């Protein structure tokens, strides 16, 4: 984001904080409780994710040729590689023989030997080794290989299409947000691994927890609310995506500082919701990524939480500090947001009331649900 835009957002955030106000949607908005519980809606949601470009990680996870990483997306194991020409590739991580995952974790390797019977693939997916070859006269090692998925790197992130035959156009998907996301640099910072939450909440309920800060004063009374304002958000939408600015408590001090001295990220957290299931958060100290997937029924979801740090991880103290920041952020989501959401899901599943209400002060929530509904109609 360019400096002028950042200053302008800071002005807007400062005004809201000073006025004890927040950006408002034109009206209240009610959603059907069954959006979170219906198997039919759940299947349509899954189809929506399947047909959308999927952000699966930071480019720093595939820093140089020979690097690989594996990702699980809606229960599907995917292998990503950076090949010798510097381009990235993605494959279903499923062996041609008996469908074992060929590789797990991440690292550097130009060849992958399946742990079951050692069929071996290079990092372009080609089958290059087959022990006991005479047993498989119908396998053509020259042309057979892992199923390739469309893959791209854009805005600093790794993207795949889950349909091998799909066209992956991430630039069209992100529109003007591509340059803005790239500008933070968080996807080139050092990755700190993944933490997974397998939760008894609908995937949309999980996304909802990131779409407003109206709940900070109550749910995060002892944590985020000690540093960030509650019910105070700058909201902007970009097609199916949106950006929220959550001002920190310190922002009101800027009234006494001339604008050319402002250091905006010291006074705000920037949160993006990327359609349909991705949340990105930028702070001065870390870049967070939440990949939120529907589970095997409407009342279950999988959240993969990633974090990156601008610190140099070769320094032990810095590495410990970065790990502590990640642990803290993760524990807050797990023990405060998601724990509370479990109670909502239980009530929704019990079917007591027909609707939930999103206030004018929750424009992010409204935008998420209007966008999903629009996508499902198309
Ligand atoms: S399943 Fe991979 S070699 Fe047998
Ligand atoms: Fe929260």
Image (cartoon, rainbow, N blue to C red):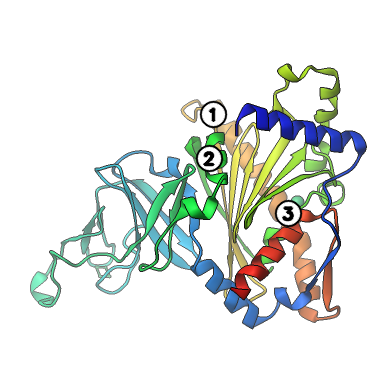
Q: Is residue 17 left or right of residue 45?
A: right
Q: Would residue 307 be seen by someone viewing this image from the given angle?
A: yes
Sooner in the amino-acid sequence: mark 3 or mark 1: 3
Q: Which mark is residue 311?
A: 1
C-alpha gap between disc 2 and disc 3: 22 Å
Q: Nearer the viewer, residue 319 or 96?
A: 96
Residue, far right: 19
Residue that numbered label 3 is attached to: 211
Q: Around disc 2, counting alpha carbons within 10 Å, would you say few (fewer than 14), some (14 to 19), or many (20 or more)? A: some
Image height check: is 156 above or below 364? above
Label 1 and label 2: CA atoms lie apart by 23 Å
- Specify whether 120 is left or right of 224: left
Considering only vertical position in the picture, is 15 above or below 167? Answer: above
Counting residues from the start of the chain, the first of labels 2 and 3 encountered is 2
- Judge: label 1 CB < 8 Å from ligand 2: no
Residue in the foreground of this view, choosing between 31 and 176: 176
The residue nearer to you, when weighing 177 against 320, is 177
Counting from the top left corner in percent of width and height, residue 178 is at 53, 44
Residue sitting at x 64%, y 38%:
325
Q: In the image, residue 22 lies at what x, y percent?
A: 85, 45
Q: Could you say whether the residue bearing mark 3 is in a helix, strand or loop?
A: loop
Residue drawn at x 73%, y 35% as measured from the top left: 9
Residue 214 is situated, as x and y percent measured from the top left of the image, at 84, 51
Q: Which residue is mark 2?
A: 179
Quadrant containing the N terminus in the rendered view: top right
* Camera-side residue of 126 and 175: 175
Q: Which picture quadrant has residue 29?
A: bottom right
Looking at the image, do the residues carrying marks 2 and 3 touch, with CB atoms under 8 Å apart? no
Residue shown at 36% from the left, 45% from the top: 107
User: Which mark is in front, 2 or 3?
Assistant: 2
- Per the image, label 1 sits on a secondary structure element best described as loop
């Amino acid at each position: 984001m360019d400096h002028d835009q950042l200053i302008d957002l800071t002005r807007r955030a400062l005004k809201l904080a000073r006025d004890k106000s927040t950006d408002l949607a034109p009206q209240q908005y009610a959603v059907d409780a069954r959006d979170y519980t219906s198997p039919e809606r759940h299947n349509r949601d899954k189809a929506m994710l399947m047909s959308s470009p999927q952000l699966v990680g930071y480019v720093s996870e595939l820093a140089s040729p020979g690097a690989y990483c594996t990702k699980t997306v809606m229960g599907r194991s995917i292998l990503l590689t950076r090949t010798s020409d510097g381009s990235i590739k993605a494959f279903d991580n499923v062996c041609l023989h008996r469908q074992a995952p060929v590789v797990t974790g991440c690292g550097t390797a130009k060849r992958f030997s399946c742990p079951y019977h050692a069929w071996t693939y290079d990092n372009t997916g080609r089958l290059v080794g087959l022990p006991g070859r005479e047993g498989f006269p119908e396998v053509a090692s020259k042309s057979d290989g892992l199923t390739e998925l469309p893959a791209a790197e854009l805005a600093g992130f790794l993207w795949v299409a889950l349909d091998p035959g799909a066209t992956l156009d991430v630039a069209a998907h992100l529109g003007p947000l591509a340059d803005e996301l790239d500008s933070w640099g968080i996807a080139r910072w050092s990755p700190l691994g993944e933490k997974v939450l397998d939760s008894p909440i609908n995937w949309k309920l999980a996304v909802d927890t990131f779409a407003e800060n109206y709940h900070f004063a109550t749910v995060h009374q002892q944590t985020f609310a000690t540093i960030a304002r509650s019910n105070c958000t700058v909201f902007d939408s970009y097609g199916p995506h949106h950006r929220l600015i959550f001002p920190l408590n310190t922002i009101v001090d800027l009234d006494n500082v001339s604008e050319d001295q402002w250091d905006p990220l010291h006074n705000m957290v920037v949160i993006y919701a990327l359609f349909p299931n991705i949340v990105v958060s930028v702070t001065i100290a870390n870049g967070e990524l939440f990949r939120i997937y529907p589970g095997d029924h409407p009342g279950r979801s999988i959240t993969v939480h990633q974090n990156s740090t601008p610190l140099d991880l070769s320094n032990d103290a810095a590495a410990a500090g970065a790990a502590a920041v990640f642990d803290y952020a993760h524990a807050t989501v797990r023990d405060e947001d998601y724990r509370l959401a479990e109670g909502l899901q239980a009530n929704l599943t019990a079917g007591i009331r027909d609707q939930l209400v999103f206030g004018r002060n929750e424009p992010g929530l409204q935008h998420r649900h209007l966008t999903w509904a629009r996508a499902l109609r198309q």
